[in-house]
Amino acid sequence: MNDPDRPYRYLEIRGVVERIDPDPEGDFFDVLARRYSLDYERPVGDAERRVILLVRPTATTSQ
């Protein structure tokens, strides 16, 4: 993740994918969009590719 106001500041998180859950309706993205006040239109035709990745962090780097 980069900080747009401070281009040399960043956070990197590495991890292991522990689980992949299907999300054909895109409900999880709707939750995130509401949480972060994102204005978007739900795409049509990509339902079979939507998934939720559960990642266990194993390392972080920051500056």
Image (spheres, rainbow, N blue to C red):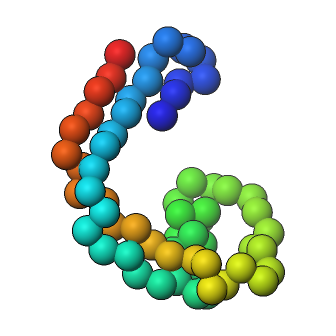
Q: In the rendered view, tell whether residue 60 sits above or below residue 32.
A: above
* Residue 9 is at least partly visible in this image: yes
Residue drawn 57% across the image and 70% down it: 29
Q: In this view of the protein, which residue sits in the foreground, 6 or 60? A: 60
Q: Quadrant of the C terminus?
A: top left
**Residue 27 appears in the figure:** no
On the picture, is 63 further left or further right than 56?
right
Residue located 50% across and 76% down the image: 51
Residue 49 % position (x, y): 61, 78
The answer to which image quadrant residue 9 occupies is top left
Q: Position of residue 35 (x, y in %)?
A: 53, 60
The quarter holding residue 14 reads top left
Point 63% across, 56% down: residue: 37
View extreme (left): residue: 58
The image quarter in which residue 21 lies: bottom left
- Location of residue 33 with respect to 52 vertically, above or below: above
Q: Is residue 31 above or below residue 58?
A: below
Residue 32 percent coordinates (x, y): 53, 63
Q: Using residue 38 as the reference point, say whether residue 13 is left or right of it.
A: left
Q: Residue at x 71, y 79 (%)?
A: 46
